[in-house]
Amino acid sequence: MSFEAMSERWEILMVALILGAAHVISPRVFKLRKHPERQDAFSGGLSVAYVFLHLIPSLDASDGLVGPRIYFVALLGFVVFYGLDVLFQPPRHTHPTRYHAYLGVFFLYDGLMVFTLGLELPPTAILTLVFAVSLSLDVLSTDIELQGGYGARFVKSGRWVLLAGVAGGYALSLVRRPHPLVVDILTAALAGFMMFNTFKGVFPVSRNKKFPAFAAGLLMFWLLHIVLSAAE
C-alpha cells in the first residue's frame, strides 16, 4: 500500500473517531449546555457551509457523468427527510415507529457522512480535521435533540445505534471505491438530508433572533476553508 493510501486511511479513521466521540460525550454536553439555541444555530451554520462549500461542489464535478439529474437526488433526500418529519408530527409523536424511523435515518446519515467524506477527502489533513469537527457539532445537535425527546431511552441504546452507523461508514470506506455514479448519488442524498436537518433545527431559531450565531458558524467555516485551501 502506498504512503498516500495509508495517509488517506488515517484521515478517514480520524473523521470516524471524531464523529464517534460526539455520540459518546453527547449526554454530558446535554447537561452542560448554557445557551442551547445559539449553540444549535452555530453548528447549523457550520453544516450549511459544509454543504455549500464541499458537497455541492462535489456534485458540480459529477455533472459530466450524471448531468443535472444529480440535483434531483439531492432534492429527493431533502423531501424524504422532510416527509418523515411531517409524518410523525403530533399527535402521532408518541408512536414508537417515530423513534425507530429516526434511528434508522440517522444511522444512514452518520454512515454517509463518514463514507462520502472518505471518498472525497479535502486537500489537506488539517482541512479534513476542520470538516470532521464541524460535522461532529452537527452530530451533537442531533443527539441532544433526540435525547430531549426520548431521554434515557436514547442515552442507553439509541446513541450506540448511531455510533454503529459511524463505524459502518468507516468500514465501507475501506472497501474498494464504488462506481462514480454510486458515489455521486450517495453524496447528493447526504446533501439533501443534511440541508433539511439543518434547516429544520436552525431557521425557527434564527427567527428568534439567533441568526448572528448561525452566521458566525457559517462565516467561521468559510474563512477556514479559504485559508486552508490557499495554503495547499
Image: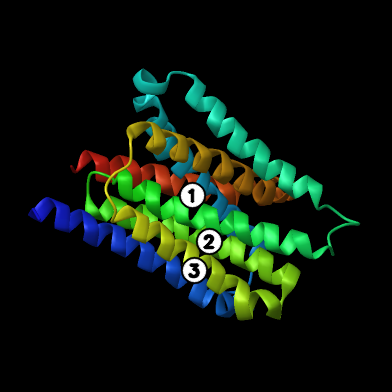
Q: Nearer the viewer, mark 1 or mark 3?
A: 3
Residue 175 rendering spot, x and y as whole percentages: 29, 53
Q: Residues within 10 Å of mark 3 (few under 14, many from 20)?
A: many
Left or right: residue 174 versus residue 21 is left
**In this figure, which residue is indicated by the disc labeled 3?**
163
Q: Which residue is mark 2?
A: 139
Q: Identity of the amino acid at label 2?
A: Val
The Cα atoms of the two marked residues, 2 and 1, are separated by 12 Å
Q: Are marks 1 and 3 in contact (CB under 8 Å)?
A: no
Element under label 3?
Answer: helix
What residue do we see at 25% from left, 41% from top? Answer: 229
Q: Earlier in the sequence, mark 2 or mark 3?
A: 2
Residue at point 40%, 36% (across, down): 182
Query: For the residue carrying disc 2, how many other residues have a C-alpha within 10 Å: few (<14), some (14-19), or many (20+)?
Result: many
Q: Nearer the viewer, mark 2 or mark 3?
A: 3
From the image, which quarter does the N terminus lie in? bottom left
| Tag in front: 2 or 1 | 2
Relative to 211, is 23 above or below?
Answer: below
**Residues under labels 2 and 3: Cα distance?**
10 Å
